[in-house]
Image: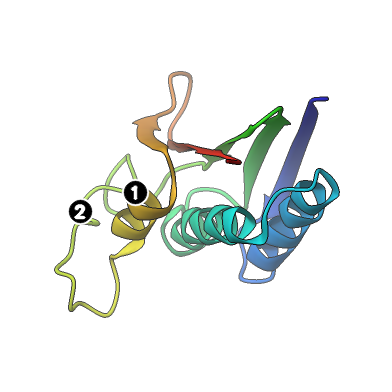
Amino acid sequence: MEVVIEMTLSRDAESAPIARQTLDASLRGLGVDSEVRADIALALGEACANVIQHAVSSTAYEIRAQLDQGRCVVDVIDGGGGDAPNSWAGTHDPVHAEHGRGLTLMHAFTDDLEISGRADKEGSVVHFEKSFG
């Protein structure tokens, strides 16, 4: 079975829990282990938080998730803004910093992480994958 979830959310703090809960409910319905679901929720939360904080050029962002037999693939797509075209630029802060550990956490809790600019317009795409087993 394959499940595809597409969300367009307002770029505000209330959107991140909605995204995490929606994806988690689908993963739980597929019988995915709670530890794997927690890893995915953490990565998605970090990606959403970055959009909410930095993608000031748009009022909304998109999440696309594909769940199949053994893998979750997520794209978080923003409209750009901030100090750089790629809102993830400069996010490699020291471990003791108050902010900027999102990439480190996402790398630690996912199997694959890629961040790229959008081909057709301003903004970034955060792509991550996590296997279920």
Q: Residue furthest left?
A: 94
Q: Residue at x 68, y 63 (%)?
A: 15
Which quadrant of the rendered structure holds the N terminus?
Answer: top right
Neighbourhood count class around disc 1 (C-alpha, 10 Å): few under 14, some 14–19, many 20 upward: some
- As helix, strand or loop, the secondary structure at mark 1 comes to helix
Q: Residue furthest front?
A: 133
Query: Could you say which disc has been placed on residue 54 in the image?
Result: none
Seen in the image, is 29 located left or right of residue 91?
A: right
- Which residue shows up at 20% across the image and 53% down it? 90
Q: How many marks?
A: 2
Residue found 20% across the figure and 77% down from its top: 97
Residue type pointed to by label 2? Gly
Residue 106 at what x, y percent from top left?
Answer: 39, 53
Q: Is residue 75 above or below residue 19?
A: above
Side (left or right) of 69 relative to 46: right
Q: Nearer the viewer, mark 2 or mark 1?
A: 1
> In this orientation, which residue lies closer to the viewer: 20 or 124?
20
Say whether marks 2 and 1 touch (CB < 8 Å): no
N-term-proximal mark, 2 vs 1 = 2
Does residue 113 appear to the left or right of 120 in the view shown?
left
> What is the residue that sits farthest to the top in this orientation?
120
The residues bearing labels 2 and 1 have C-alpha atoms spaced at a distance of 16 Å
For disc 2, the marked residue is: 90
- The residue to which callout 1 is attached is 107
The residue closer to the viewer here, 45 or 121, is 45
